[in-house]
Image (cartoon, rainbow, N blue to C red):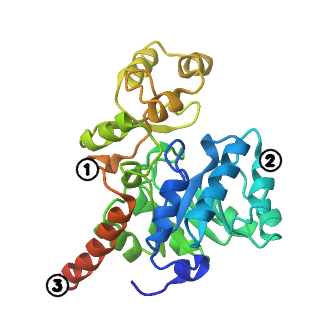
Amino acid sequence: MKENRITELFDIKYPIIQAGMIWASGWKLASEVSKAGGLGIIGAGSMYPNVLREHIQKCKKATSKPFAVNVPMLYPDLDKIMEIIIEEEVPIVFTSAGNPKTWTPHLKSHDIKVVHVVSSVKFALKSQEAGVDAVVAEGFEAGGHNGREETTTFTLIPMVKKELSIPLIAAGGIASGAGILAAMILGADATQIGTRFVASEEASSHINFKKEVVKAKEGDTRLTLKELAPVRLLKNKFYEDVVKLYSTSPTKEDLQDLLGRARAKKGMFEGDLEEGELEIGQISGLINEILPAKKIMENLISEFEAAKIEASAIEF
């Protein structure tokens, strides 16, 4: 892979970014991806401030390569999180679930590169106007919390590319080298990959959850709870309870009562496959084994090179 705008921006070897997923993306995973030439991300969304500081410090000890922290801006201790990121001199921050204007200028004043995650052309342009260095455009194939537009990745990427001048990172439904190549042909400078790295040895998610990801087939995930915040889940007892509740024409409060608190932690981190919320992407149907993050990176790179050769032989 030749150097491009994202590898130059982040000072990394390959335009492959590991998503900052809650309950999965700790320092072990982030450092391994960064050491392998990609950009590892620590997911702050499931960490108390003191826990995040510990993960950042351990990641710095594990690798001298660049890494990032992902910060959902709905976080209740956001001021403390941002203070720690600045104090620990994290070089790159990915923000999501909020207004990029709120923190981008402050972070950039401390020489931190800022990337914002969006699900539409409209918010990609707002992010560019806010001064971010790059945008992640995520289609609704992705696992976890999603945009309300339900635009697929391969529809979204060329639409955003047409309007954007800053670097573009594609996310959602990508777990192979061929997927990376396809996204880049459509205009992405790099790809962000989540689900494939959940099924890694270094992911901090529970082994029960990882095994369910590997077992998943096409059609085993659904986007639901749109009245609260759209989220893509594996089908399980909790999902069926949601479906049953929808049959009664529930209020937003009814849905919130069923969801309760710490449902994602229960499923993804504690391994409760019945009552937990199991957030994962549609591409889980393509994943068949749990591998070391280094091996996943090696596979993605070799698959990308093989896909380029195959594509060059295609005739119209």
Q: Is residue 308 shown to the viewer in this render?
A: yes
Of the pair 149 and 170, the residue shown nearer to us: 170
Q: Is residue 261 above or below residue 10?
A: above
Q: Position of residue 52 (x, y in %)?
A: 67, 48
Classify residue 108 by image quadrant: bottom right
Check disc 1 and report the residue beneath it: 289
Q: Amino acid at mark 1?
A: Glu
Check disc 2 and report the residue beneath it: 80
Closer to the chain start, of discs 3 and 1, is 1
The circle on residue 242 is none
Check disc 3 and report the residue beneath it: 313
Of the pair 32 and 191, the residue shown nearer to us: 32
Helix, strand or loop at disc 1? loop
Classify residue 143 by image quadrant: top left
Q: CA distance from mark 1 to mark 2?
A: 38 Å
Residue drawn at the location 66% of the way across and 50% of the way down: 54
Q: Position of residue 255 (x, y in %)?
A: 55, 20
For the N terminus, the quadrant is bottom left
For the C terminus, the quadrant is bottom left
Q: Is residue 51 above or below residue 134?
A: above
Q: Position of residue 235 (x, y in %)?
A: 34, 30
Q: Is residue 95 shown to the viewer in this render?
A: no
Q: Amino acid at mark 3?
A: Ala
Q: Is residue 10 left or right of residue 314?
A: right
Residue drawn at the location 32% of the way across and 51% of the way down: 283
Q: CA distance from mark 3 to mark 1?
A: 30 Å
**Which residue appears farthest toward the front when viewing the image?**
61
Q: Amino acid at mark 2?
A: Lys
Other residues around mark 3 within 10 Å, as few (<14) / some (14–19) / many (≥20): few
Closer to the chain start, of discs 1 and 2, is 2
